[in-house]
Image: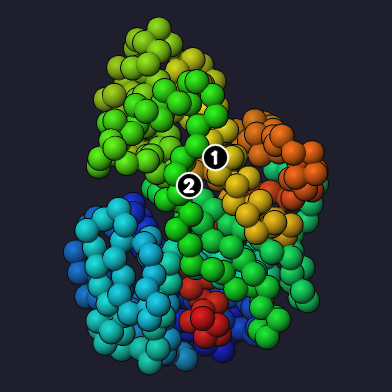
Amino acid sequence: MIRADQHVFVADIGGTNLGVAIFARSGKDRFEPVCHHTYHTKQIRDIPSFFRSYLRREGRKLDPAVRSACIDFAGPIGANRSRAALTNLNLTFTAREVREAVGVESLTLLNDFEAVGFGIEVLIANRPEAFVRISRSGKLPPRTGRKPTATVLGAGTGLGTTVLIYDPVSGRYRPLPAEGGHVDYGPVDEIEFQIAQWIRKHRNDSPSNPLNRERVVSGRGLANVCEALAELKPELGSPKMRREFFRVRLQDRPAFISGNANHDALCRMTLDLWLRSYARAAKNSAILPLAQGGVFLAGGVAAKILPEMQTGTFMKEFQRCDIPNIRSILRRIPVFVVTDYRIGLYGCANVAANGVV
């Protein structure tokens, strides 16, 4: 345990899991979790009361005491950062409610991938081994000095995105709040068009609306692709495996697909199609700001299927482009899988300790 100059309370509220922690800070960028726990988000009815109980239990003997906090959530952040409303859950709370409940002097709300963006530099400084490069070349951004623009996205329950812009005043990356997971999905071949139409018909709130990228490129999207293929190609895979897939709980279907991809044709085709869609989402996110500092794949799915991310399927699709000079740029952009799920908590600790928002 490091000797703490400061303790901060942080939380990462996703559509499936809620991570909560207290971090000790020593020096500029050295952070270490004093405690860290994960809960099912749906089980938490009253966010302010839950955080109050947690901090009283885990933080009562800390010296110095917790005086600042930062909480991120999976949903759009307003301009005044006063209220949280999760996109995929009926869960809301205000910054004032939480601040008064836990008794801190300052509290900041962040979008979940904004927090991931604030966590990139801190994780590079504390745990650089948490970044696994899947591109042939490239290196992490420098810890000090000017940093090239980078982009972050990650498939988990949903699909989060942010862009990292270097701020010359602070000398740090400044992530931009973004909802890039909700752009329209773009299929590129016949089977993808068929899958997109199936998902649009069966998963959209209104089939007349465009298909949201998140309904394909996410953990839930992976299950959607498999369901679509099961109906579109009934001859694919074994009947036994198909029956088992539909008996598995919705939240466990992505793990079922990846776990059976090496010995079932339906799961194999599902995962390959999904990897290519994820790669194009990453490519589009990299091209828009010309993210020569790298693409960071966070979220829960990529780290869980790291061997699949390293086979070359993802990178081949990421670099596929009809314009030669853009294709050459894509080949030079490093791509990393972030394997530490606490990156959002590190980002919240960065904000709570440094007040960088």
Task: Give the mark toward the camera: 2 or 1.
Answer: 1
Task: Residue at 55%, 77% (x, y): give it.
Answer: 350
- The image shows residue 332, relative to residue 74, as above or below, that is above
Query: To which quarter of the image does residue 168 belong?
Result: bottom right
Whether residue 48 is visible here, answered yes or no, is yes
Task: Residue at 74%, 57% (x, y): give it.
Answer: 292
| Residue where numbered disc 1 is placed | 278
- Amino acid carrying mark 2 in the image: Ala
Mark number displayed over residue 155: 2
Looking at the rendered structure, the secondary structure element under dot 2 is: strand
Looking at the rendered structure, the secondary structure element under dot 1 is: helix
Q: Position of residue 242 (x, y in %)?
A: 35, 17
Mark number displayed over residue 5: none
Query: To which quarter of the image does residue 20 belong?
Result: bottom left
Q: Position of residue 43 (x, y in %)?
A: 22, 57
Badge 1: residue crowd in 10 Å (few <14, some 14–19, many ≥20): many
Task: Residue at 33%, 52% (x, y): give it.
Answer: 16
In the rendered structure, the answer to whether residue 263 lies left or right of residue 157 reads right
